[in-house]
């Protein structure tokens, strides 16, 4: 991992993808690709342009007013909502690090 922001982003992305899978919600391609790259430890090797494109796609699919954001907003379990908030914070900081 290049930075603490990148690590936090990868960790929280795994939670979001796992949650969506467990709740039978289609996982958008950018989220799945990103999570798989972190899981296989290949994210750090991706060219910056590819990382930036994936992060843009992840943001589009998960930030308000996306379906994923609405799902977590209405989800009844506090823990899941907290973890999604943590993900959004990590996404924000990592986007800043990438200059988005």
Image: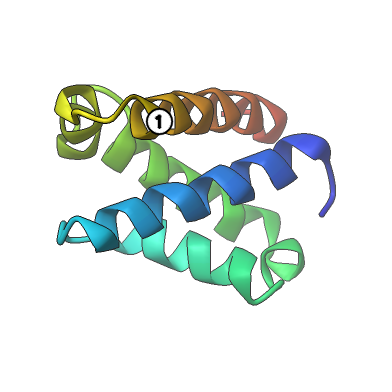
Give the quadrant of residue 85. top left
Under tag 1, what secondary structure? helix
Side of 65 relative to 18 (left or right)? left
**Camera-side residue of 83 and 70:** 83
**Camera-side residue of 65 and 26:** 26
Which residue is at 50% across, 60% downward?
34
User: Going by the picture, which residue comes out furthest to the bottom?
Assistant: 40
Question: Mark 1 — residue?
Answer: 79
**Camera-side residue of 65 and 19:** 19
Which residue is at 73% across, 35% downward?
5
Side of 8 relative to 65 (left or right)? right
Figure quadrant of the C terminus: top right
Examine the rendered structure and indicate whether residue 88 appears above or below residue 45: above
Give the quadrant of residue 24. bottom left
Percent x, y for residue 46? 68, 66
Percent x, y for residue 63? 32, 28
Percent x, y for residue 27? 26, 60
Residue 28 visible, this orientation? no
Which residue is at 38% across, 56% downward?
17
Side of 94 relative to 12 (left or right)? right
Side of 2 relative to 61 (left or right)? right
């Amino acid at each position: 991992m290049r930075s603490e922001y990148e690590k936090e982003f990868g960790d929280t992305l795994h939670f979001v993808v796992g949650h969506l899978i467990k709740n039978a919600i289609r996982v958008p391609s950018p989220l799945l690709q990103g999570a798989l790259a972190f899981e296989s430890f290949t994210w750090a090797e991706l060219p910056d342009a590819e990382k930036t494109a994936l992060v843009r796609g992840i943001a589009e699919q998960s930030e308000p007013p996306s379906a994923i954001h609405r799902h977590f907003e209405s989800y009844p379990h506090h823990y899941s909502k907290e973890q999604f908030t943590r993900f959004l914070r990590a996404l924000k900081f990592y986007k800043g690090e990438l200059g988005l």
